[in-house]
Amino acid sequence: MTDDAALLLRKKDSFPQVFITRTTNNNISGLAIASRLPMDEVSFSPFSDLGDMSEALVDGEVLARKGVGRVRVSLLHGGITVDLLVTHTAADPSRQRGYDNSLHRKHQAREILKKHVGKSDADVVVLAGDLNSPPNGKGIVEQYVCLLAL
């Protein structure tokens, strides 16, 4: 989402609160959360495992600086806190490249659950985004289910 798109959402008054995650060098990371509720806190944390540096010019994952955006909102006059998390995990290059980023996604999944979901003190945590699960769904889903048990 661009700054222009966020401005358009605000002008239409359908989502007065828009958080666009930015990387450490202030580039737009591509993640956004729009809310009708006031945002009490906002943050963005890049993943510690961004991908394979040797493949940076092939798949661009390291250069994308993906991570987790977080917005905290309050419901019922502050009686219930909700952490809204948005993420985009490492994608795979084309099959012709002969490798995938499943190990990096696994590390990112662990980081999401341990650092963000597991350490949240909110009453409710909602995780959304592009998890880049393969078409058969095997792998990343199992990782998330296993990690949720931690």
Image: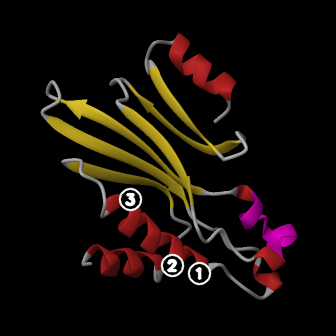
* 60 relative to 121, above or below: below
Name the residue tied to disc 2. Answer: 106
Left or right of 104, for residue 149: left
Give the residue displayed 56% in from the left and 67% down from the top. 132
Question: Image quadrant of residue 52?
Answer: bottom right
Q: Residues within 10 Å of mark 1 (few under 14, many from 20)?
A: some
Quadrant of the image for the N terminus? Answer: top right
Label 3 packing within 10 angstroms: few (<14), some (14-19), many (20+): some
Residue 92 picture location, percent across and down: 68, 73
Left or right: 75 as drawn, with respect to 46: left
Residue 39 magenta-highlighted: no
Q: Nearer the viewer, mark 2 or mark 3?
A: 3
Splitting the image into 4 quarters, where does residue 150 fall? bottom left
x%, y% of residue 25?
Answer: 73, 44
SS state under label 2 = helix
Measuring from the top left, give residue 149's x and y in whole percent: 24, 78
Q: Nearer the viewer, residue 139 or 147?
A: 147
Which x, y percent locates residue 148?
A: 29, 73
Kind of residue at badge 1: Ser
**Range shown magenta:** 55-63
